[in-house]
Image (cartoon, helix red, strand yellow):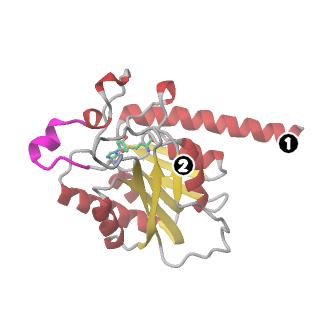
Amino acid sequence: MPFSLHQGDALSVLAELPDNCVDSVITDPPYNSGGRTAKERTSRSAKQKYTSVDAGHDLPDFTGENMDQRSYGFWLTQIMTEAHRLTKSGGTALLFTDWRQLPITTDAIQAAGWLWRGVLAWHKPQARPQKGRFTQNCEFIVWASKGAIDGSRNPVYLPGLYSASQPSGKARQHITQKPVSVMRELVQIAPPGGTVLDFTCGSGSTGVAALLEGRDFIGVEKTRHYAEIAAARLTETLQQTLTQDDVTLTS
Ligand SMILES: C[S@@+](CC[C@H](N)C(=O)[O-])C[C@H]1O[C@@H](n2cnc3c(N)ncnc32)[C@H](O)[C@@H]1O
């Protein structure tokens, strides 16, 4: 089966997976950004943080967005340590984050044993300009490897800057959904036929991209509603790719 999807907590699920079973960990964890006080952290849900009241949709909330800074650092270190065990030597890790959480993310990834390689930028063209300030129109992808990278194993040349808007309207199925076009480029860091892991996969955008690019996928998602959306999107994508293969075979 080109994909497996687990509904549950990432730490418990990853603990059950065997060593060296993935080529790339590509994940978009809750950023736990902002919220300087306990009151601010607990009184605003992820939904209130990431969606505007006038957006006209009713996407359910998701879990894991109310940690204080120290807890987030510990959690990220723990989960990335487990992800390191699951990754083949020379494999890679890509972690989405925002400007506030860049330092804690680069600390955690290194504390977990990864070799920090750099920071990619995801530019969102539709962000609103702010008077007297710089526009907040980028999120970031911290990337790292498990030891040396053998470029001859997967000789790709990938950009450091990605530009695409977050899905909108009916296509928006998760509060913080990432564009499949961006994810399709990112998953190419895993060799063709390799396996990509996303342990906070939300609506499954990483998995959709992996299947479209001929990579296998392991996904974990704790919020049942989003695990169900991911299952539906992955199944639909798999059917699409199989149909395409059939067409190629019979033509
Ligand atoms: C930023 S969203 C991912 C969105 C995804 N990239 C997409 O395009 O749909 C993070 C997801 O992680 C899930 N999550 C939070 N804590 C988790 C945990 N401990 N284990 C597994 N999933 C978790 C949340 O429910 C949320 O859906």
Horizontally, residue 32 falls left or right of residue 21, namely left
Residue range in magenta is: 33-45
**Mark 1 belongs to which amino acid?**
Leu
Whole-percent x, y for residue 233 in the image = 54, 34
Whole-percent x, y for residue 135 in the image = 36, 46
Q: Is mark 2 within 8 Å of ligand 1?
A: yes
Nearer to me, 77 or 57? 57
Q: Label 1 belongs to which residue?
A: 249
Residue 179 appears in view: yes
Q: Closer to us: mark 1 or mark 2? A: 2
- Kindly identify the residue that appears in the image at 80 percent across and 38 percent down: 246
Give the mark nearest the N terminus, 1 or 2. Answer: 2
Task: Indicate which disc residue 183 carries.
Answer: 2
Residue 3 appears in view: no
Secondary element under disc 1, as helix, strand or loop, is helix
Asked if residue 42 is among those painted magenta in the image, a careful observer would answer: yes
| Ligand 1 shown in quarter | top left
- Kindly identify the residue that appears in the image at 37 percent across and 74 percent down: 113
**Mark 2 belongs to which amino acid?**
Met
Asked if residue 12 is among those painted magenta in the image, a careful observer would answer: no
